[in-house]
Amino acid sequence: MSLIERHHPSAGTRLRRGGTAAAAAALTLFAATACGSSGGSPKAAPSAPAPVTAAPTTPSALPSGLLSGLPSLSDLKKWNAHDWDTWAKQQPAFTQAVKGFWDLQKMLQAKPADPVAPPQQPTDGGNDPLPSAIQAQAIAHPYSQNPVDGKVFFDVGPDKHAVCSATVISDPQHPGKSNLIWTAGHCLTSGKTAQRYQNIAFVPAFNSSGEVSHGKQPTSKSQFAPFGVWDVSDAVTSPQWTAEGGETGSAASQYDFSIMKVVNPDANGKSLEETVGGSVPVWFNAPRDQLKITAIGYPSAPPFDGMEMERCNGGQPSRLSFDASRPAMEVIGCTMTAGSSGGGWFAVKDGRPALVSNTSIGPQESGWLAGPYLDDVAKSALDYLSKKN
């Protein structure tokens, strides 16, 4: 099947509805401390290369609803490009990697650390029973049917390399020529501690050839990065994640998404979409009862090593909520571990795959994953970055 029809999920296991979540299992973000840091303690947020603080703000400079630092959900859903731009200028400056920064050795050093238990469990409101585990399945090499899926590399501190997963998505303003990828918010910033990660880059179809599998050492970049290494030049996440996000699952996880813009390593080259051969549209406000989800990512924590692209046919999602005033997260059975964060969740719309969420959190003992429900806030963020020069 073609690359933009390759994610057709199987029926999978139909999940039970109703009841409360059996949330005794500890949740953790598959992020810099649990999804891909090569150093530092898993008990504390990784240190930045230099102290990073949010720019000072004044009430008069803030969009409506942002006087306390976080807009109300109803206000945020009404934001226009000016509101997003005003808010974005208050965040730490974005630093692009120098060309050629990421080599294979740095990528291989981006290993996951131990997960961290959350200080609290989800509330009962808006929760379903947790699904049974579904075993992740390795996707066969080469990844010719999955070139839109890949790995995101970034630095969480000096010589502390981290990794997530991501997907090439369609750009509403540049159809057929998208340079946008979708991943998790915690792959961009630490959240409430105001650390924006540095040197972010995307490698579509990482290790498609299998030349990095089983400890092999490829002799050329094309063997592990068949479409090149695409540095991220700009990105946006939700104000909820920015204001509240942390190392463990919380209400911020219900808006744990990020959209990133990349640049071709060849200044005169084609767009990312043209280079890999396609993109996946994002399906906002997707009806939950019509979804049968397939999740794709590069899990790095044992028993995985981050070299293989894996998939879970999770079937119909259930719900998990920390804050009943926000859309409940989608939940599927899946044994993927840290490193799969940010990886795309796909469902069929009009006969073709569309992205409906991304991996955000999961239990210490892998068995299920949860991702944010993509509502009007996520759509507004995509529209903003798509229109931004």
Image: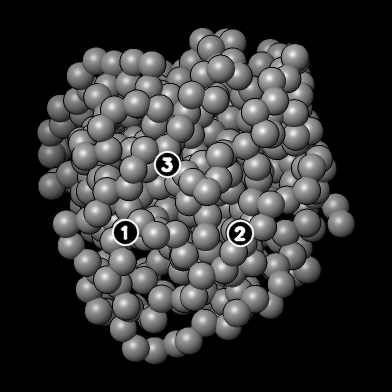
Helix, strand or loop at disc 1?
Answer: strand
- Marks 2 and 1, Cα distance to the nearest angstrom? 19 Å
**Of marks 2 and 3, the one in the foreground:** 2
Label disc, if present, on residue 27 of the rendered structure: 1
Residue position for label 3: 35
First of labels 2, 1 by sequence position: 1
Helix, strand or loop at disc 3?
Answer: helix
10 Å crowding of disc 2: few (<14), some (14-19), many (20+): many
Give the amino acid type for the residue marked by disc 2 in the picture: Ala
| Residue displayed at 66% across by 16% down | 265
First of labels 2, 3 by sequence position: 3
Q: Which of 195 and 238 is in front in this view?
A: 195
Question: In the picture shown, does residue 215 fall above or below 13?
Answer: above
Toward the right, the furthest residue is: 1
First of labels 3, 1 by sequence position: 1
| Residue displayed at 43% across by 24% down | 161
Can the viewer see residue 8 in this picture? yes
**Residue 87, percent across and down?**
30, 37
| Residue displayed at 68% across by 13% down | 267
Give the amino acid type for the residue marked by disc 3 in the picture: Cys
The mark tally for this picture is 3
| Image quarter hosting the N terminus | bottom right
Residue 374 lies left or right of residue 113; in this view the side is right
Residue position for label 2: 136
Helix, strand or loop at disc 2?
Answer: loop
Give the amino acid type for the residue marked by disc 1 in the picture: Leu
Toward the bottom, the furthest residue is: 18
Can the viewer see residue 83 in this picture? no
